[in-house]
Image (cartoon, rainbow, N blue to C red):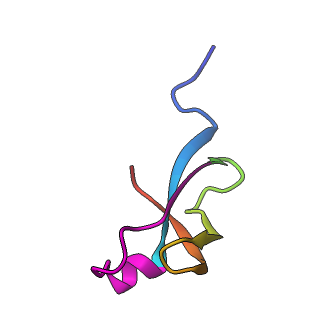
Amino acid sequence: MAKGKDVRAIVILECTSCVRNGVNKESPGISRYITQRNRHNTPNRLELRKFCPYCYKHTIHGEIKK
């Protein structure tokens, strides 16, 4: 009975300030979180304020393509 696409999609959130500033040699990487979103309730891209351990502050994490 399952249809083609599942309602709940797994998405990856990436820190926008790390990507915008570029990863310098002091920073070991880019902060990423994995979460789920409901396609019917949130049809557009997801953005959440999460803690970035590389920036040492709460920043906007936006959805990226897999």
Count of numbered tags: 0
31 relative position to 58: left or right:
left
4 relative position to 7: left or right:
left
Q: Nearer the viewer, residue 6 or 50?
A: 50
Q: Which residues are magenta?
A: 17-35
Residue 40 vertical placement versus 7 (above, below): below
Q: Residue at x 59, y 63 (%)?
A: 46
Q: Residue at x 58, y 76 (%)?
A: 60
13 relative position to 66: left or right:
right
Instruction: Determine which quarter of the picture holds residue 10.
Output: top right
Q: Is residue 8 located in the magenta-colored stretch of the structure?
A: no
Residue 18: percent from the left, percent from the top?
A: 42, 78
Q: Nearer the viewer, residue 52 or 38?
A: 52
Q: Is residue 21 located in the magenta-colored stretch of the structure?
A: yes
Residue 13 vertical placement versus 53 (above, below): above
- Residue that protrudes farthest toward the left in the picture: 25
Q: Residue at x 48, y 74 (%)?
A: 54
Residue 49: percent from the left, percent from the top?
A: 65, 73
- Residue that protrudes farthest toward the top in the picture: 1
Residue 3 vertical placement versus 6 (above, below): above
Q: Residue at x 54, y 71 (%)?
A: 53
Residue 47: percent from the left, percent from the top?
A: 60, 68
What quarter of the picture does the N terminus occupy?
A: top right
- Residue that protrudes farthest toward the front in the picture: 26
